[in-house]
Image (cartoon, helix red, strand yellow):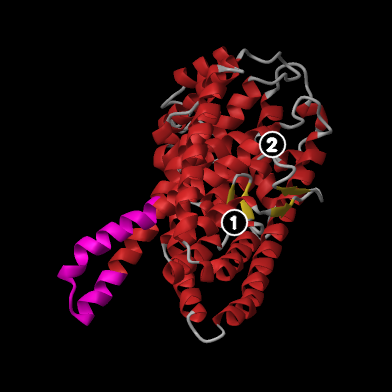
Amino acid sequence: MSKMSKKLVSAVSILSLISFVIIGYCIPNIDSKEILPLLFWVFLGSIFESLPIYYTKDRSVSVTFAIIIASYLSHGTYFTTIVAAFSSILVYIKNNNGTHNHLFNMPIQYSLINLSNYTISMFLAGSVIQILESVWAPFFSTSVMSSWLIIILFAIYILLVFFLNSTIMSFYASLMYNSPFIKTWLSGTIWALPNFIAIAPLGFFLHKVYGLPNGSIYLLLILGPILLSRYSFKLYLDAKEQHYKTIRTLTAAIEAKDEYTEGHSRRVEHYVECVAEKMRFSSSRMESIKIAAILHDIGKIGIKDSILGKPGLLTNDERNEVQQHPQIGIRILDEASLSSQIRESILHHHEQYNGKGYPNKLKGNEVPLDAYIIGAIDAYDAMTSDRPYRKALPKEKAIAILKEEKGKQFHPEVVDVLISILEQEEKNEVLK
């Protein structure tokens, strides 16, 4: 076991032990009359924790936090800590391949990571709010001021849960992937804050419904519309994923004609996504640039195979024909409902920062940044792949060319980000 793996095992062991102590402390503080409500909330929490919606390979949304908030507002810290702890491990998740993940077939460390994260986060957040409430209560004595205190404490609770939850998960992730903690926290968790804030009002609403006579029954009735909304959203994401698969299949079929470019678009898409994440693109912009990356060379279907596969240097006429592929690609995609951002990225991905590219010899800020990103990665993959006219260059040589052409052929910022990703990739390979 590697040194880093031992660190992770130690971290999981220590935080899990802390979570067991917290659970042992909370259980005696729950009134025996609350056992049935406790089972009810654990049931709700487990259902929603079992139904995450993954909108990227490692990011998901769920409404479990709404259940946590409603439980906290209705029953307090100790109760909610137990609800969160058991909800985190009593999951039954259906995978896309038809298999299921649950407590009895998942690696124990994953269950312990979830358990410790939820338990410690909810207990500490609730405890801090209890302290703040006792300290601030005398200063909010009137009914109006008391309402403001509730709102302030509610907002602090949301932020505390997010901060503690994201901190613990980032700590685990930094040990898993040997990455800096701050970088992991910023890149891996900030995206979830809007989700926490958006779900908070739903939690408050569920709390109010639960407080009505027969509130538990009403909550169960509300489950239907929530699950239907979840199902509709999943259908939308599935349709979008199918759209991606169709595009990838199309480009793969085109590339399969040429052994030298097979898999090129997928590799470009991969690095484009890495660069876009590092440059903190929005989710919609990320989606656009990935589609453009997949389709950037689709116009080559209109170029003669004899030219694309020519082992020697191209003539001027042949080179001019190859340089028509961005415009050909745009014409092919005329009937597709693609945004102007995607179309511009495809059309201009061979423009150069110094204005010596094609098709329009644009330069500097005249070219969209997305096109520069695709262009730099396209060039890097071409350099490090075998081509009919030469063997693949070593990765180090390709990186040296990127540095040499920084501010000339390639956008300076894009080069810096791409090289940092490639160098980190190399470090990770050495550590394996």
Write down the residue under mark 1: 87
Q: Is residue 1 above or below residue 345?
A: above
Horizontal side of 369 relative to 150 (left or right) equals right
Residue at image point 56% right, 12% down: 397
Q: Position of residue 384 (x, y in %)?
A: 64, 20
The answer to whether mark 1 and mark 2 are in CB contact below 8 A is no
Q: Type of residue at label 1?
A: Ser
Element on which disc 1 rests: helix
Locate residue 127: give its quadrant.
Answer: bottom left
Q: Residues within 10 Å of mark 2 (few under 14, many from 20)?
A: some
SS assignment at label 2 = helix
Percent across and percent down for residue 354 are 43, 30
Q: Nearer the viewer, residue 157 or 80?
A: 80
Q: Quadrant of the N terminus?
A: top right
Left or right of 239 on screen, residue 376: left
Residue 422, percent across and down? 54, 24
Q: Indicate which label's residue lies in the foreground, 1 or 2.
A: 1
Which residue is tagged 2?
266
Q: Amino acid at mark 2?
A: Arg
Of helix, strand and loop, which mostly describes the magenta segment?
helix
In the rendered image, residue 364, in percent from the top left (x then y), is placed at: 41, 37
Report the disc number at residue 388. Answer: none
Residue segment shown in magenta: 124-150
Rate crowding at label 1 as few (under 14), some (14 to 19) or many (20 or more) other CA atoms within 10 Å: many
Q: Does 191 appear above or below 207?
A: above
State the separation of the CA atoms marked 1 and 2.
38 Å
The reply to whether the magenta stretch includes residue 126 is: yes
Q: Residue at x 84, y 33 (%)?
A: 257
Residue closest to the eye, 38 or 426? 38
